[in-house]
Image: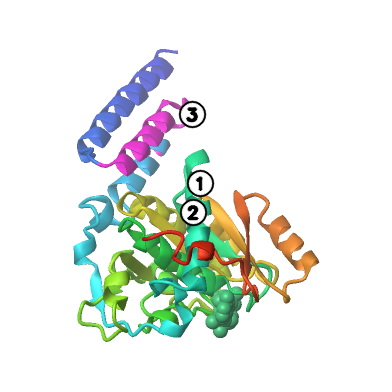
Amino acid sequence: MSRIYEALQKAESDRKLDRNELEQVLPEPEPVRAAMMQTAVAEIEEPAAPVAVVERVVERVVEPYEPEIVRSGLSLSNVARCAWTPAIDRLPALQERGPGVEQFRSLRSRIYELRDIKPLKSILISSGLPQEGKSFVAMNLAISLSRHKSSKVLLIDGDMRRYTLHQMLGTEAHPGLADYLAGKATMFEVMQRMAESSEGAKGAVANLANLTFIPGGNGGDKAADLSGNPRFAELIRAVSPYFDWIVVDSSPVLPVSDAVNLARACDGVLLVARSGVTKYPVAQRAQSELKASNILGFVLNAVANPPQVGSYYGYDAETE
Ligand SMILES: Nc1ncnc2c1ncn2[C@@H]1O[C@H](COP(=O)(O)OP(=O)(O)O)[C@@H](O)[C@H]1O
Ligand SMILES: [Mg+2]
């Protein structure tokens, strides 16, 4: 009886010791750490096998997944600057006026309205099938958001099979999201911004100044596994404080499950349907695949005669 009592006493004092050690290991500036700490303390309170639990927690906390951002913070001025040569004809949101830029301003306004109702920062763009305009919408929406009140926007190419956003910006696709998710690169290493000396069309450098980009990298056959890696949610959580918006392009939801995995880490999902191409059952099934996520709505892409926003007055409806 007394031996059991002594053993219990010893386990209790070991627990206290481990908790003290844990608190010493963890100076506490960032909220991410604070959240981890709460989890750690909650688990320590568990009565069963306390020593084993503490060992596991120490292991998890002492090796943070991304020291340079979580510990020191992300300074956007330190993100690598790359020479971008944007494909201007695919980027109507870069223009000063015209139906393309107006449609994206209008979409942006809708998104701001949605954010007034419910917190919204990370938005995944998807659709049922390839070629419906996901990448076109993701890229132009990201540019439009970044031009409004100099908002800081992170654009992520989450289609690790057919990544195309880097082509639209005229830059490298590597290292990219797939490399980060595979643990071959840090989140800081896969980010890039436009070099001020880039040879873009007039105004492109200024209009892309607030955009940070993570290209796709080559996920290949491993894309499904990579998209399910918790490192994606860690990325979104760690960089969120440094951006006003995060836009994530993705693969189509009907052939592969990657987008459904990535959507779990995002605040909302915008679905794209291509006018005259997307069949109603395809749009319906895409919506159903993502029903566990917060679907913000559909974007009807490539409409032949879109309503001319603000054209009645002969000038753009909205300035940036
Ligand atoms: N609204 C649009 N106006 C003009 N071209 C478009 C439009 N939407 C998409 N495209 C073009 O259609 C092709 C497929 O679009 P993309 O965004 O790559 O589709 P997805 O990402 O869904 O596979 C691309 O060449 C793209 O430039
Ligand atoms: Mg695409």
260 or 117, nearer to the observer: 117
* Residue marked by disc 3: 48
Task: Give the structural element (helix, strand or loop) at label 3.
Answer: loop
Residue at (29%, 65%) from the top-left corner? 188
Q: Quadrant of the C terminus?
A: bottom left
**Which residue occupies the foreground of this view, 235 or 98?**
98
What is the quadrant of the N terminus in the image? top left
Residue 307, numbered circle: none
Is residue 176 in the magenta section? Answer: no
* Residue 83, horizontal then vertical, whole percent: 27, 83
The numbered dot on residue 113 is: 1
Given the current orientation, which residue lies at the most extreme right position?
281
Could one spot residue 313 in this view of the protein?
Answer: yes
What amino acid type should be assigned to the residue bearing mark 3? Ala
Report, in whole angstroms, how far the alpha carbon at label 3 lies from the one at label 2.
Answer: 52 Å
3 vs 2, front mark: 2
**Residue position for label 2:** 109
Horizontally, residue 51 falls left or right of residue 262, namely left
**Horizontal and vertical percent position of residue 161:** 54, 78
